[in-house]
Image (spheres, rainbow, N blue to C red):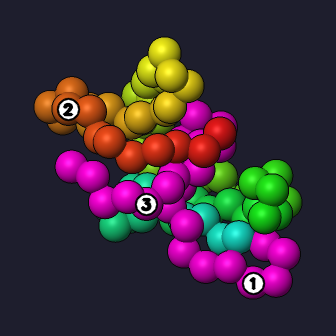
Amino acid sequence: MSNGKRMYLFGGFTFNRCRHSGEYLGWYCSNYHNGCKASVLTTRDYIPAHARHFHNHDKPYVHRASNGIYTVVKSERNTLLKRPVLR
């Protein structure tokens, strides 16, 4: 499954971008729709500026391919998601 959106990897967890304001980007936990309220605010250079880093789930398995691209493996079926992850 590929939707072409980037993810942000912080502390072993993945985040989706939700907004940008001036020099900052807002990211919400990839498990937000399952009830997780963790979020990260980064600069446009992806440097963390502020984090609410309390998750209600385990870290996902993130695989680094030989070409340097990170992908997330879904734990339910161990299927590889073709989504680039920024680290």
Q: Tell me: 49 left or right of 21.
A: right
Q: Secondary structure at mark 1?
A: strand
Q: Give the residue at mark 3.
A: 5
Q: Secondary structure at mark 3?
A: loop
Q: Secondary structure at mark 2?
A: loop
- Report the amino acid beneath label 1: Ser
* Residue visible at 45% across and 50% down in the picture: 56
Q: Give the residue at mark 2.
A: 79
Q: Residues within 10 Å of mark 3 (few under 14, many from 20)?
A: few
Q: Quadrant of residue 13?
A: top right
Q: Which residues are magenta?
A: 1-24
Q: CA distance from mark 3 to mark 1?
A: 19 Å
Q: Earlier in the sequence, mark 2 or mark 1?
A: 1
Q: CA distance from mark 2 to mark 3?
A: 18 Å
* Vertical position of residue 20 compared to residue 83: above or below: below
Q: Give the residue at mark 1.
A: 21
Q: CA distance from mark 2 to mark 1?
A: 34 Å
Q: Tell me: 76 left or right of 42.
A: left
Q: Quadrant of residue 26?
A: bottom right
Q: Quadrant of residue 17?
A: bottom right
* Residue 74 visible in image: yes
- Report the amino acid beneath label 3: Lys
Image quarter (top left, top right, bottom left or bottom right) of the C terminus: top right
* Vertical position of residue 3 compared to residue 59: above or below: below
* Residue visible at 59% across and 50% down in the picture: 8
- Report the amino acid beneath label 2: Thr
Residue 15 is a magenta residue: yes
